Image (tube, helix red, strand yellow):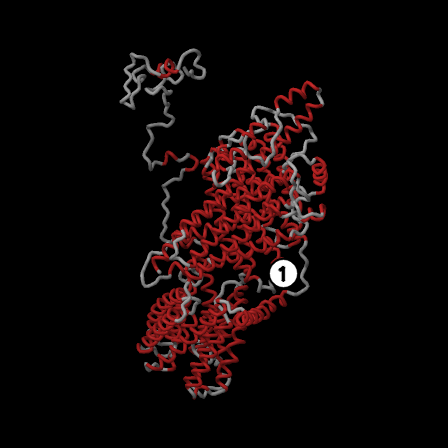
């Protein structure tokens, strides 16, 4: 019988089962034969301290007399708060800093810009400098900005727009088009088409709005003087200059300050997230790991939001050239690039830690893993602490020189990283070479990828230091740079657009012409409809609405139109009420200032900012007119409504641009580039190093000799490592054209991926005649998976960067790459087959390709799995062969006795590529694959190598590991990234299939 541990001669039945007289009742699960015994005999350590199933009695650990679930007694005493003082939360918003910032912004605009303008309009200030009563206030609504950089950027945009619309309007006045309605319509439509074709965004809106105002004014007064457009321009300039004054008084708010504040938040969160992640791998428990990762994910989300804020403010700070040095601006830009790359490393870390969270026993229940953790955890903490100190110091380094002065902290990071690499190699030598494992445990790829990402973060920091040291002071002044960006770059873009339009005839350029034609047609149609129904020319306001609601697709136009209609109703009602009950100039000044203060207060709000801007545009004419009538109010509402409806009808009926179609085409292009990237990355298995071509004069990077047979080449490789960059400084010095080509491809793919974000929101709102619920979750999963796959492709590139940063491959490494090359090519071929099928399915949603797509993904996953498993087996084979060879050489020095003994215990090692081909051939059938046997780890070759977990080998001091730290981390990171990439391909298929099903229903 089986005996219990420590049970002496007593059997399992004698120890665990109750005696015959204990009234053992198996039906009553809750009963226990020892329940009626005295407490002294009921302890766990006694002979009868077992339950009815023979297990030791459970001793309750928690107090059963707990208070109610809402009691504060569960909270530690030091954290309890007294309930004696009640807080009043009615006016809690008064404690918000954002509330007072918005109040300050509204007061600046109201007191410095709006009050003088209203005084000029109503005659309170006796200066006759305004041509119209509404232009200056409309300019204030459009030009109200918070920061200096934002204001100066708008001024440049305003001047650029003025250089376009003012000559066209002046030419129309000079030709006297107001007396010839037919010629006026033709000229009006043609100029609108030209403006809409060659301008974009705010420049386009300002040009369309002011040109329309001037041409409608010319239609109302055909005998207007030649300076009429210039008077309109002057009125808008007055409002713009008053807003500029409000930005500076009483003190300026700079975009550079906000950009630097965002960088500080990014640096602090990056350092905290890096420290938290590095402590999660060997965590005391999975619960602590889960809690830490939850905090880390919140920090990464904060970094993402702060990066968006930084780029917005950094673009505005470009125009603060009079108040900000180019050196500080470039330093902020370089630091932002550093944090972007560190964020990519954090995402890679989170991916491997997500796998650890899902399978914690792989790390927590492996003795070898815990031994690695005991060796490496203190040094990982040192690296994290040094990185955290550097991140904190970068928050106060505002110039390139200040960053260069942090050389000591950069050195600390390098020293800690070098120490970590040394300890990692020592742990590998001890736990992999001296304590020879039978198989490569599951934690090894995860741990190596974890180490790879940590050290890669240091490489990123080192690259940042190198880039900062190479920065040259620009001889071009900041003003010249701004002029070049504002004047020359837009002109250059328009020239390129014209050339592309007549040379390539691509969809993007042609669609731009179609949208320009829609805008001009809608505006002239609105003018015609207004005149047809007898609207007074002086109150003709329908076409100006289209200048602000025009978009690139019908969904965008409808969204802007809904907001505009809501704002129209709100502004009309409030403007009519204020205009009716404001009879004196003082009343008008007060009412306009109060309404503009309220509107400006909500202007910076994310949800209501656009709405209040449109509402202020509508209420200004109604509140500033001498007499406001119901007919004028209704007429403006009708014109706005009909103008929006006309544009929506034209936009949806004439060559509509479907956002979902554009999103599909963009994703097709992204998938095609994914396929190209995978092909190039897998092709690197056969690409020689740049130094190999110079040293060997050969294009063959691999060796046909078995592992360990080329001793001369091994000695040459070992000698050349003295000139190779250390692991902690493994920056690519020589030009690697293959890596640069892949890097350019990945950068382009990343830019394309970012451009799909706006169309995802538009596609969600699009609908046809048949309403079908849009698969929002599937669209979000698709975007998330594509971004993950993009990050994994970048991780593969970094893995190859490590492998190719050496002067030459070792013979073992050459042999490994040669062995894995066919599998990698199969994997890339199967993924490209999946890409081809998916692209065809996206172009033709009604085609049922589910079976072919599933088979392609399955082939891809199987190829990647076989590559990973073969890599694991080969690395164990290489390690074992090197250890056996070293052990045999050591035994030869001790005499013939030891040599004969070794010959009996060690069989000749087989080739690392001979993965039980006979077994594979018998088990594979048609397709020869070692995958089933690799999964079961049943190769005879492993046993023939004499691998034993109990054997501890003492290696000599001059022993050289056949697989270096770079090789190990590069291979493991590459294979694990490929494995996660193949799994994400399966998830991508599932989410895209759900979206294809939606397209089939709406077709």
Write down the residue under mark 1: 325
Q: Position of residue 761 (x, y in %)?
A: 41, 58
Quarter-wise, where is residue 583 in the image? bottom left
Name the secondary structure under disc 1.
Answer: loop
Q: Is residue 205 above or below residue 951?
A: below
Judge from the rendering whether residue 694 lies leftward or rightward of residue 741; answer left or right: right
Residue plotted at (41% across, 64% down):
658
Total marks drawn?
A: 1
Question: The N terminus lies in which quarter of the figure?
Answer: top left
Q: Is residue 221 above or below residue 62?
A: below
Q: Is residue 10 above or below residue 262?
A: above
Please indicate, yes or no, whether residue 384 appears anywhere in the rendered image: no
Question: The C terminus lies in which quarter of the figure?
Answer: bottom left
Q: Position of residue 487 (x, y in %)?
A: 58, 71
Q: Position of residue 716 (x, y in %)?
A: 72, 39
Work out whether residue 451 or residue 739 is closer to the camera in this orientation and state it: 739
Q: Position of residue 873 (x, y in %)?
A: 56, 35
């Amino acid at each position: 019988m089986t005996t219990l541990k420590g049970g002496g001669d007593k059997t399992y039945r004698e120890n665990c089962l109750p005696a015959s007289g204990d009234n053992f009742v198996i039906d009553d699960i809750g009963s226990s034969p020892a329940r009626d015994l005295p407490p002294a005999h009921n302890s766990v350590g006694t002979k009868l301290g077992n339950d009815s199933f023979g297990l030791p009695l459970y001793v309750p650990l928690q107090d059963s007399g707990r208070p109610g679930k809402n009691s504060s007694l569960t909270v530690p005493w030091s954290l309890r708060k007294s309930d004696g003082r009640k807080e009043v939360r009615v006016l809690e918003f008064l404690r918000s800093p954002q509330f007072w910032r918005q109040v300050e912004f509204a007061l600046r605009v109201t007191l410095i810009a709006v009050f003088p303008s209203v005084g000029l309009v109503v005659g309170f200030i006796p200066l006759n400098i305004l041509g119209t009563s509404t232009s200056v206030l409309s300019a204030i609504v459009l030009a109200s900005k918070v920061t200096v950089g934002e204001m100066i950027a708008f001024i440049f945009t305003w001047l650029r727009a003025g250089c376009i619309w003012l000559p066209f309007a002046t030419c129309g006045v000079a030709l006297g088009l107001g007396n010839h309605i037919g010629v006026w319509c033709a000229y009006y439509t043609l100029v609108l088409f030209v403006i809409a074709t060659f301008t974009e965004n705010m420049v386009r809106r300002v040009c369309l709005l002011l040109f329309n105002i001037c041409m409608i004014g010319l239609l109302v007064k055909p005998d207007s003087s030649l300076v009429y457009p210039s008077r309109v321009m002057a009125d808008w300039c007055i409002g713009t200059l008053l807003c500029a004054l409000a930005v500076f008084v009483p003190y300026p708010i700079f975009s550079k300050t906000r950009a630097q504040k965002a960088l500080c938040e990014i640096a602090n969160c990056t350092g905290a997230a890096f420290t938290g992640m590095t402590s999660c791998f060997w965590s005391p428990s999975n619960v602590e790991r889960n809690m830490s990762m939850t905090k880390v994910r919140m920090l990464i989300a904060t970094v993402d939001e702060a990066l968006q804020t930084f780029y917005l403010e950094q673009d505005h700070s470009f125009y603060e050239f009079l108040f900000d040095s180019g050196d500080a601006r470039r330093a902020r830009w370089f630091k932002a690039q550093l944090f972007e790359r560190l964020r990519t490393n954090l995402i890679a870390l989170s991916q491997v830690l997500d796998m650890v969270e899902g399978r914690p026993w792989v790390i927590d229940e492996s003795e070898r893993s815990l031994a690695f953790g005991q060796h490496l955890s203190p040094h990982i903490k040192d690296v994290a602490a040094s990185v955290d100190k550097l991140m904190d110091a970068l928050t106060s380094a505002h110039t390139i020189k200040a960053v260069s002065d942090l050389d000591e902290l950069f050195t600390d990071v390098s020293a800690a990283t070098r120490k970590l690499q040394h300890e990692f190699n020592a742990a590998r030598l001890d736990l992999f070479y001296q304590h020879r494992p039978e198989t490569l445990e599951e934690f090894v790829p995860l741990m190596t990828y974890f180490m790879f990402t940590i050290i890669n973060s240091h490489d990123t920091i080192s690259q940042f230091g190198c880039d900062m040291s190479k920065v040259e002071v620009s001889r071009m002044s900041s003003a010249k740079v701004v002029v070049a960006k504002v004047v020359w770059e837009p002109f250059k873009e328009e020239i390129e657009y014209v050339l592309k339009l007549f040379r390539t005839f691509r969809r993007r350029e042609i669609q731009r012409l179609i949208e320009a034609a829609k805008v001009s047609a809608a505006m002239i149609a609105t003018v015609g409809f207004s005149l047809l129904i007898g609207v007074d020319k002086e109150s003709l306001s329908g076409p100006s609405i289209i200048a602000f609601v025009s978009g690139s697709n019908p969904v965008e136009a409808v969204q802007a139109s809904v907001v505009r209609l809501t704002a129209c109703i709100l502004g009309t009602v409030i403007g009519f009420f204020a205009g009716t009950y404001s009879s004196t100039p003082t009343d008008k000044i007060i009412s306009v200032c109060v309404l503009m203060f309220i509107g400006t207060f909500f202007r910076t709000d994310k949800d209501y900012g656009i709405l209040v801007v449109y509402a202020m545009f509508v209420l200004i004419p109604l509140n500033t007119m001498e007499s406001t009538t119901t007919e004028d109010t209704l007429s403006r509402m009708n014109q706005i409504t009909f103008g929006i409806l006309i544009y929506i009808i034209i936009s949806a009926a004439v060559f509509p641009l479907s956002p979902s179609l554009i999103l599909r085409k963009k994703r097709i292009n992204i998938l095609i580039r994914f396929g190209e990237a995978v092909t190039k990355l897998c092709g690197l298995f056969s690409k020689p190093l740049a130094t190999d071509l110079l040293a060997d004069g050969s294009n063959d990077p691999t060796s046909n000799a078995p592992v360990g047979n080329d001793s001369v080449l091994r000695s040459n490789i070992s000698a050349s490592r003295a000139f190779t960059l250390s692991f902690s400084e493994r920056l690519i010095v020589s030009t690697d054209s293959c890596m640069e080509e892949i890097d350019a491809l990945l950068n382009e793919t990343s830019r394309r991926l970012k451009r799909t974000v706006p169309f995802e929101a538009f596609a969600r709102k699009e609908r046809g005649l048949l309403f079908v619920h849009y698969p929002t979750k599937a669209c979000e999963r698709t975007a998330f998976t594509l971004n993950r796959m993009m990050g994994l492709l970048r991780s593969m590139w970094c893995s190859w960067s490590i492998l190719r940063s050496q002067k030459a491959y070792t013979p073992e490494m050459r042999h490994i790459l040669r062995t894995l090359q066919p599998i990698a090519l199969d994997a890339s071929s199967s993924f490209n087959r999946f890409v081809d099928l998916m692209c065809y399915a996206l172009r033709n949603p009604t085609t049922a390709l589910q079976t072919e797509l599933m088979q392609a993904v399955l082939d891809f996953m199987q190829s990647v799995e076989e590559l990973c498993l073969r890599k694991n087996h080969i690395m164990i084979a290489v390690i074992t062969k090197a250890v056996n060879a070293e052990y045999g050489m050591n035994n030869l020095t001790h005499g013939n006795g030891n040599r004969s003994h070794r010959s009996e215990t060690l069989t000749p090692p087989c080739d690392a590529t001979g993965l039980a081909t006979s077994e594979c051939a018998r088990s594979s059938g048609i397709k020869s694959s070692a995958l089933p046997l690799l999964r079961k780890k049943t190769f005879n070759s492993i046993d023939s190598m004499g691998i034993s977990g109990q054997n501890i080998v003492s290696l000599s001091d001059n022993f050289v590991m056949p697989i270096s730290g770079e090789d190990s981390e590069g291979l493991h990171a590459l294979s694990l990234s490929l494995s996660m990439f193949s799994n994400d391909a399966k998830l991508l298929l599932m989410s895209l299939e759900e979206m294809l099903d939606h397209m089939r229903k709406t077709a």
